Image (cartoon, rainbow, N blue to C red):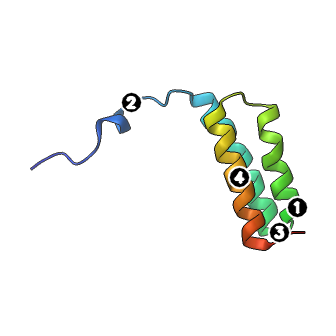
Amino acid sequence: MPKLKPRYLNEAPPIPEADRLLTEFLGKAMSLEQSGNINGATEKLKEFPLFESSLRHQDIARSESVWLKSEYGPS
């Protein structure tokens, strides 16, 4: 039977600290969103680049912020 798991899943992430921090920010933003505080959620995501220099991770946070704005409309 062939192994269907890609090899990259066995490798450590290239920037684990950035992954951890992004996960923390996304979790806080999601909590704010679920409580109805969309402005707070987008602001939390906008703060992320102040704490992380990884452009890839910054782009993910920015994309999530844009998605929230498009999903809920301007505030």
In this view of the protein, which residue sits in the foreground, 40 or 56? 56
Which residue is disc 1 drawn over? Answer: 39
The residue at 77%/68% (across/down) is 34
The residue at 83%/41% (across/down) is 47
In this view of the protein, which residue sits in the foreground, 39 or 27? 39
Screen quadrant of the C terminus: bottom right
| Disc 4 to disc 2, C-alpha distance | 24 Å
Q: Secondary structure at mark 4?
A: helix
**Kind of residue sitting beneath label 4:** Gly
Which corner quadrant of the image does residue 9 belong to? top left
Which residue is disc 2 drawn over? Answer: 11
The residue at 69%/37% (across/down) is 21
Q: Are marks 3 and 1 in contact (CB under 8 Å)?
A: no
| Disc 3 to disc 1, C-alpha distance | 11 Å
| Disc 3 to disc 4, C-alpha distance | 12 Å
Q: Position of residue 61 (x, y in %)?
A: 70, 47
Which residue is disc 3 drawn over? Answer: 35
| Disc 2 to disc 1, C-alpha distance | 37 Å
Q: Secondary structure at mark 3?
A: loop
Which residue is disc 4 drawn over? Answer: 27
Identify the mark nearer the N-term, 4 or 2: 2
Query: Crowdedness of circle 2 by 10 Å Cα count: few (<14), some, many (20+)?
Result: few
- Above or below, comparing residue 64 to residue 72 in the picture: above
**Kind of residue sitting beneath label 3:** Ser
